[in-house]
Image (cartoon, rainbow, N blue to C red):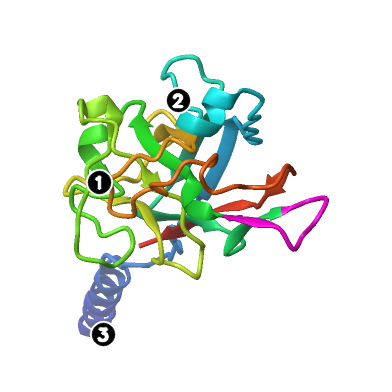
Amino acid sequence: MKKTILTSAIALIIAGSAIAQPVSDRAVIPLGVTLVQILRIHVINGGNIEFVFNDINDFKNGISNAQGNGFYDSDVTIASSTEWELDMGAEDANLIGTDDPAQTITLDNVGFTCDWGTVAALNTCCGAALDVDNTGAYTNNITAAGAPNIANGLLQYTGAASVILFTTGAAGNGGDILDNNFTINWECGTQIGGGTSPMNATSLLDQNVLPDRYVTNVFLELTSI
């Protein structure tokens, strides 16, 4: 009897030890990171540029851009969560008369340079390392970098990468509007040469352009790269 009780006690001790063994459990917490593409461009000033030729000297020499007055400037900001490229071009093949649409003047009577606000080192404009019209000729016209006023003539927009205005530099160009802001300096009839796409070398006076208001829209196409 004592042997049976002892055996039972040992069995209970062994069973208790087995029950007291450490156990493990596992809970699962799903974790995800969602990156929503941010790609925004805003023309904060100069969303409508109007050149008025009302003096014979304007017809002979054109209307230049006196940098700093902002009168013929378009201020642009970009916010992007990735590297980006900006293409620019006119909607139409020519500037079209509003009173008589059959009357046109060529786009290259309008020229532009670019002036970076804060990040010139991260990007290149219309040249330096870019081919603005696929000719293989490069022109640096970043006016803020001290380059001469070599304007590029306005070209028609025919799709992405047709007229590259800005693309990423070695350091990348993603960022907010404090990282990416610049000014397009417009001019008209100034006959500036030497650009990748030079302006019209003939004055509006010698082109014998009929009086009218000639218009087109300029597209700024922002894409992530």
Examine the rendered structure and indicate whether residue 89 appears above or below residue 47: below
Q: Nearer the viewer, mark 3 or mark 2?
A: 2
Q: Residue 219's x, y, as percent?
A: 57, 54
Q: Mark on residue 4?
A: 3
Foreground label between 1 and 2: 1
Residue type beneath disc 2: Asn
User: Would you say the residues marked 1 and 3 are in contact, meaning their CB atoms lie under 8 Å apart?
Assistant: no
**What's drawn in magenta, residue-wise?**
97-105
Task: Say the numbered circle drawn on residue 65.
Answer: 2
| Above/below status of 9 relative to 37 | below
Q: CA distance from mark 1 to mark 2?
A: 17 Å
Position of residue 105 relative to residue 10, above or below, is above
Quadrant of the drawing holding the N terminus: bottom left
Q: Which residue is mark 1?
A: 194
- Say whether residue 135 is left or right of residue 221: left
Label located before the other in sequence (1 or 2):
2
Q: Mark 2 Cα within 10 Å, few/some/many (few <14, many 20+)?
A: many
Q: CA distance from mark 1 to mark 3?
A: 111 Å
Q: Is residue 109 visible?
A: yes
Looking at numbered disc 3 in the image, what kind of residue is underneath it? Thr
- Horizontal and vertical percent for residue 205? 54, 39
